[in-house]
Image (cartoon, helix red, strand yellow):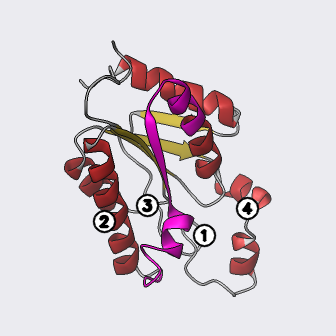
Amino acid sequence: MNNGNSNNGFVVWLTGLPGTGKSTISAELTKIFQEKGFCTETMDGDEIRKGLSADLGFTKEDRQEHARRVAFVSKLLARNGVAVNVALISPYRSFREHARNEIENFVEVYVKTPLEVCMERDPKGLYAKAQQGEITDLTGYQDTYEEPLNPEVVIDTCDTTPEGAAETIVSKLDELGYFSN
């Protein structure tokens, strides 16, 4: 397995419904990776849509292309020694499996939060807009979200803080040999 002293980085792929806390956990991971001396990059789905995927909508095909682009850039970064955090809903198992097959050092993290809790949190107002009919394809509410079958890590955000979630992920990365000397 890889370690932090090699030329290869790794990709932590956080998947889950909107409002689970993927971006917040990713930010905590970035801090830890930097403290461990890694070059790090965050691939946040919302941010990527403002640039690299600005031409895409939310059809299944567009979501697939968005995930493909994120996976491609993440692969390039990782093979050049970067610790990459991907915070991307990536609702379809086939898309995540594509990323796993493309990226050598891939760790899938399912950020698991009940839909009702995500709706209560609703940090971006997406669920409210979906309830009012302003959004018609919100993942997990009006559109499909396929839970991961065998992620390396499952984080229940009802039972842990973002810092605790990041520490759990880092422990798994250490177990897998990414921080070995």
What residue do we see at 75% from left, 62% from top?
122
Identify the residue position indicated by label 2 in the image. Answer: 68
Q: Which one is in front, 77 or 152?
A: 77
The mark lying in front, picked from 4 and 2, is 2
- Where residue 109 sits: x, y (%)? 46, 41
Q: Which of marks 3 and 1 is in front?
A: 3
Upstream in the sequence, badge 2 or badge 3? 2
Do labels 4 and 1 touch, CB within 8 Å? yes
Q: Quadrant of residue 116?
A: bottom right
Q: Is 96 situated above or below 2? A: below
Residue type of the residue flagged with mark 3: Ser
Horizontal and vertical percent for residue 140?
A: 56, 65
Residue occupied by mark 1: 141
Query: Could you tell me which secondary element the residue under label 3 belongs to?
Result: loop
Residue 107 seen in render: no
Instruction: Give the residue at mark 4.
Output: 119
Q: Identify the mark nearer the N-term, 4 or 3.
A: 3
How crowded pointer 2 is (Cα within 10 Å; few <14, some 14-19, many 20+) is rated as some
Q: Give the range drawn in magenta.
A: 30-57
Mark 3 = which residue? Answer: 90
- Say which label, 2 or 1, has the lower sequence index: 2
